[in-house]
Image: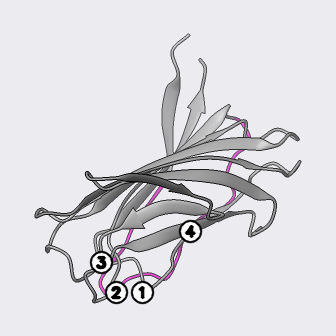
Amino acid sequence: MANTFIPLATVTVGAGGLSTITFTAIPQTFTDLQIKLSSRTTLSTSVASSVFFTFNSSTVNFGNITFFGNGTSVSSFSESRNAGSQNSGGSTTGIFANINMLICGYATANNKAYYVNASVENNATEAYIYGNNSTWSDGTAISSITLTPNAGNFAEFSTATLYGISKS
């Protein structure tokens, strides 16, 4: 059967920015979840800024490996709860990073696997891609997800949408 993506909530950041984007009261009726985030940070430097997340406000029991490529080299590192990077306020105006997160079996009492891919480019010479394969070792169903930039706020027009995925 084909998967069905149902939009559950969308947050679009207004003037002045937003320090976090939070999805709460997530219904437990889907198989998986997906978050699509198009974002920039208000950080004024030209350095890209990471986006971090929590499930149910938890910052523990996350394990991961992140792969990073910049067009010249590839590396890997482990940074718990990292969803990739986003453009900063010092990058080309109007360019937003794209982050996709797939969370499998979010409503079960088992550990949760999730995958994140992100791309950041500056409409110039910079381009980055991230892939993050991870698990959250917790037997609690995910009922809330919070996204937070590691510096600055989410900039105006950043948008995040949470989708429920069902198999019917």
Q: Which mark is residue 116?
A: none
The residue indicated by pointer 2 is: 43
Relative to 15, say whether 132 is above or below.
above
Are the residues flagged by discs 2 and 3 in contact, CB closer than 8 Å?
yes
Q: CA distance from mark 1 to mark 3?
A: 9 Å
Magenta stretch in the rendered image: 10-29
For the residue labelled by badge 4, is the local secondary structure a helix, a strand or a loop?
A: strand
Give the side of residue 2 with respect to residue 65, left or right. Answer: left
Are the residues flagged by discs 4 and 2 in contact, CB closer than 8 Å?
no
Looking at this view, is 28 or 45 the one in front?
45
The residue indicated by pointer 1 is: 152
Give the side of residue 162 with respect to residue 12, left or right. Answer: right
Are the residues flagged by discs 1 and 4 in contact, CB closer than 8 Å?
no
Are the residues flagged by discs 1 and 3 in contact, CB closer than 8 Å?
yes
Measured as percent of width and height from the top left, residue 20 is found at: 52, 76
The residue indicated by pointer 3 is: 88
Q: How is the image coloured?
A: one colour
For the residue labelled by badge 3, is the local secondary structure a helix, a strand or a loop?
A: loop
Measured as percent of width and height from the top left, residue 111 is found at: 82, 43
The residue indicated by pointer 4 is: 52
* Rendered residue at 42%/83% (across/down): 153
Are the residues flagged by discs 2 and 1 in contact, CB closer than 8 Å?
yes
Tell me which amino acid carries mark 3: Ser
Measured as percent of width and height from the top left, residue 43 is found at: 34, 86
Q: CA distance from mark 1 to mark 4?
A: 12 Å
Q: N-terminal of the two: label 1 or label 4?
A: 4
Which quadrant does the N terminus fall into? top right
Q: N-terminal of the two: label 3 or label 4?
A: 4
- Kindly indicate the quadrant of the structure image that contains residue 12: bottom left
Badge 3: residue crowd in 10 Å (few <14, some 14–19, many ≥20): many
Tell me which amino acid carries mark 1: Gly
